[in-house]
Protein backbone atom coordinates (compact mmCIF):
# COMPACT_ATOMS: atom_id res chain seq x y z
CA UNK A 1 0.00 0.00 0.00
CA UNK A 2 1.49 3.33 -1.05
CA UNK A 3 0.87 6.55 0.77
CA UNK A 4 -0.11 9.61 -1.24
CA UNK A 5 2.39 12.44 -0.82
CA UNK A 6 1.28 15.68 0.73
CA UNK A 7 0.53 18.46 -1.79
CA UNK A 8 1.24 20.97 0.98
CA UNK A 9 4.83 19.79 1.26
CA UNK A 10 5.21 19.97 -2.52
CA UNK A 11 3.96 23.56 -2.40
CA UNK A 12 6.50 24.42 0.29
CA UNK A 13 9.27 22.87 -1.83
CA UNK A 14 8.13 24.93 -4.82
CA UNK A 15 8.16 28.19 -2.84
CA UNK A 16 11.60 27.55 -1.35
CA UNK A 17 12.91 26.56 -4.79
CA UNK A 18 11.51 29.77 -6.26
CA UNK A 19 13.15 31.85 -3.52
CA UNK A 20 16.50 30.11 -4.07
CA UNK A 21 16.15 30.65 -7.79
CA UNK A 22 15.45 34.36 -7.39
CA UNK A 23 18.39 34.72 -5.00
CA UNK A 24 20.66 32.92 -7.46
CA UNK A 25 19.57 35.13 -10.35
CA UNK A 26 20.09 38.23 -8.21
CA UNK A 27 23.64 37.10 -7.41
CA UNK A 28 24.31 36.47 -11.09
CA UNK A 29 23.13 39.97 -11.93
CA UNK A 30 25.25 41.50 -9.16
CA UNK A 31 28.26 39.70 -10.54
CA UNK A 32 27.57 40.53 -14.18
CA UNK A 33 27.15 44.23 -13.60
CA UNK A 34 30.08 44.53 -11.16
CA UNK A 35 27.87 46.05 -8.48
CA UNK A 36 29.97 44.95 -5.52
CA UNK A 37 33.46 45.06 -7.02
CA UNK A 38 35.25 44.88 -10.36
CA UNK A 39 37.63 42.24 -9.05
CA UNK A 40 37.32 38.91 -10.92
CA UNK A 41 37.38 36.92 -7.67
CA UNK A 42 34.22 38.66 -6.49
CA UNK A 43 32.50 37.69 -9.74
CA UNK A 44 33.66 34.10 -9.38
CA UNK A 45 32.51 33.85 -5.75
CA UNK A 46 29.12 35.34 -6.60
CA UNK A 47 28.80 32.93 -9.54
CA UNK A 48 29.75 29.94 -7.40
CA UNK A 49 27.25 30.92 -4.71
CA UNK A 50 24.56 31.45 -7.35
CA UNK A 51 25.28 28.01 -8.85
CA UNK A 52 24.93 26.36 -5.43
CA UNK A 53 21.61 28.14 -4.85
CA UNK A 54 20.35 27.18 -8.29
CA UNK A 55 21.31 23.53 -7.84
CA UNK A 56 19.38 23.58 -4.56
CA UNK A 57 16.40 25.10 -6.37
CA UNK A 58 16.54 22.44 -9.08
CA UNK A 59 16.69 19.64 -6.49
CA UNK A 60 13.75 21.07 -4.55
CA UNK A 61 11.75 21.56 -7.75
CA UNK A 62 12.38 17.95 -8.73
CA UNK A 63 11.30 16.81 -5.25
CA UNK A 64 8.12 18.89 -5.55
CA UNK A 65 7.38 17.37 -8.95
CA UNK A 66 7.84 13.88 -7.54
CA UNK A 67 5.44 14.62 -4.69
CA UNK A 68 2.80 16.39 -6.77
CA UNK A 69 2.82 15.77 -10.54
CA UNK A 70 0.35 18.63 -11.06
CA UNK A 71 3.12 21.15 -10.39
CA UNK A 72 4.80 20.27 -13.68
CA UNK A 73 4.65 23.71 -15.37
CA UNK A 74 5.98 25.54 -12.33
CA UNK A 75 8.75 22.99 -11.92
CA UNK A 76 9.81 23.35 -15.54
CA UNK A 77 9.86 27.14 -15.15
CA UNK A 78 12.03 26.83 -12.04
CA UNK A 79 14.40 24.46 -13.80
CA UNK A 80 14.72 26.85 -16.73
CA UNK A 81 15.22 29.76 -14.36
CA UNK A 82 18.04 27.88 -12.68
CA UNK A 83 19.66 26.79 -15.93
CA UNK A 84 19.38 29.93 -18.07
CA UNK A 85 21.56 32.41 -16.11
CA UNK A 86 24.71 30.24 -16.24
CA UNK A 87 24.12 29.60 -19.96
CA UNK A 88 23.68 33.33 -20.56
CA UNK A 89 26.94 34.05 -18.72
CA UNK A 90 28.71 31.38 -20.76
CA UNK A 91 27.41 32.82 -24.05
CA UNK A 92 28.43 36.35 -23.01
CA UNK A 93 31.90 35.12 -22.05
CA UNK A 94 32.35 33.33 -25.38
CA UNK A 95 31.17 36.42 -27.30
CA UNK A 96 33.52 38.65 -25.28
CA UNK A 97 36.48 36.35 -25.97
CA UNK A 98 35.64 35.93 -29.66
CA UNK A 99 35.09 39.62 -30.40
CA UNK A 100 38.22 41.38 -31.67
CA UNK A 101 39.68 44.27 -29.74
Image: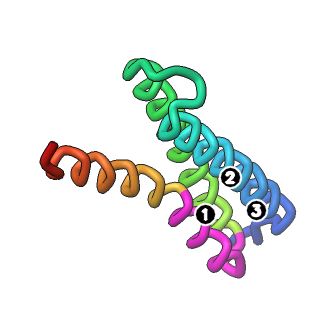
User: Marks 3 and 1, Cα distance to the nearest angstrom?
Assistant: 14 Å
Magenta region's main secondary structure? helix
Q: Position of residue 23 (x, y in %)?
A: 67, 42
Nearer-N-terminus badge (2/1): 2
Q: Position of residue 66 (x, y in %)?
A: 61, 67
* Mark 2 in CB contact with mark 1 (< 8 angstroms): yes
The residue shown at (46%, 34%) is: 47
**Residue drawn at (44%, 28%), measured in percent from left and top?**
43
Q: Is residue 73 magenta?
A: yes
Closest to the observer, 27 or 98: 98
Identity of the residue furthest to the right in this view: 8
Residue 4 vertical placement versus 24 (above, below): below
Q: CA distance from mark 2 to mark 1?
A: 7 Å
Task: Read off the residue under disc 2.
Answer: 17
Q: Secondary structure at mark 3?
A: helix
Q: Is residue 93 left or right of residue 15?
A: left
Dot placed on the residue nearer the N-terminal end, 3 or 1: 3
Is 57 contained in the magenta span?
no
Q: In front: 12, or 7?
A: 12
Dot 3: within a 10 Å radius of its alpha carbon, few (fewer than 14), some, or many (20 or more) residues? many
Q: CA distance from mark 2 to mark 3?
A: 10 Å
Q: Is residue 40 left or right of residue 58?
A: left
Image quadrant holding the N terminus, namely bottom right
Q: Which mark is residue 10?
A: 3
The residue identified by callout 1 is 78
**Quadrant of the frame with the C terminus:** top left
What range is drawn magenta here?
A: 68-81
Amino acid sequence: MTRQASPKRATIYEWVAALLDVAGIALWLLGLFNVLSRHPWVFMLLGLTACVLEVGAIVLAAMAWRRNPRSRVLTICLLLGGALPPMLVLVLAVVAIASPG
